Image (spheres, rainbow, N blue to C red):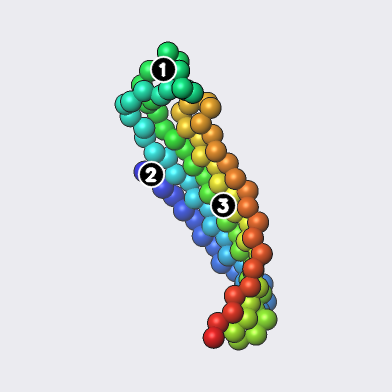
Amino acid sequence: FNTVTAQWQHSLRPDLMLDSSITYATQTQTGGEQCFGTLLSVCGGPNLGDSTSYFATTVLTHTLTDSLSTHVRFSFSDRMSPLVIDRFYQSLVLVGFTKTF
């Protein structure tokens, strides 16, 4: 893996924090055969090349009290393989609360 990550944190107000990060990664794939479906006659040659991945996350945290905060998180990930059919991506939004005792 070769990976580069950048992170940024900013206080918008004393009770409101914004955290962001982005990551770029590559992984070299070597050897093996890639088969599609269940038919062995549809096997390709060696699977060589780089897989590329991107990840981005932003979290907005609002502190309500000393022991209670709420947050909204947006995450995006994208992974691309040397094979055209191997691409996976996801967007995700989460809303939650954190309570400490």
The residue identified by callout 1 is 40
Q: Amino acid at mark 3?
A: Ala
- Residue 23 lies, with reference to residue 70, above or below; the image says above
Closest to the observer, 75 or 26: 75
- Residue 75 lies, with reference to residue 44, above or below; the image says below
**Residue 27 image label:** none
Image point 59% across, 79% down: which residue?
A: 99
The residue identified by callout 2 is 2
- State the image coordinates of residue 50 (x, y, percent, origin top left): 41, 33
Please indicate, yes or no, whether residue 16 appears anywhere in the rendered image: no
**Residue 56 image label:** 3
The disc, 2 or 1, on the residue closer to the chain's N-terminal end is: 2
Query: In the rendered image, which quarter is residue 101 located in?
Result: bottom right
- State the image coordinates of residue 4 (x, y, percent, origin top left): 44, 49
- Residue 61 lies, with reference to residue 29, above or below; the image says below
Q: CA distance from mark 1 to mark 3?
A: 38 Å
Secondary structure type for disc 3 = strand
Q: Which marked residue is nearer to the observer: mark 2 or mark 1? A: 1
- Mark 1 touching mark 3, by CB under 8 A? no
Closest to the observer, 75 or 14: 75
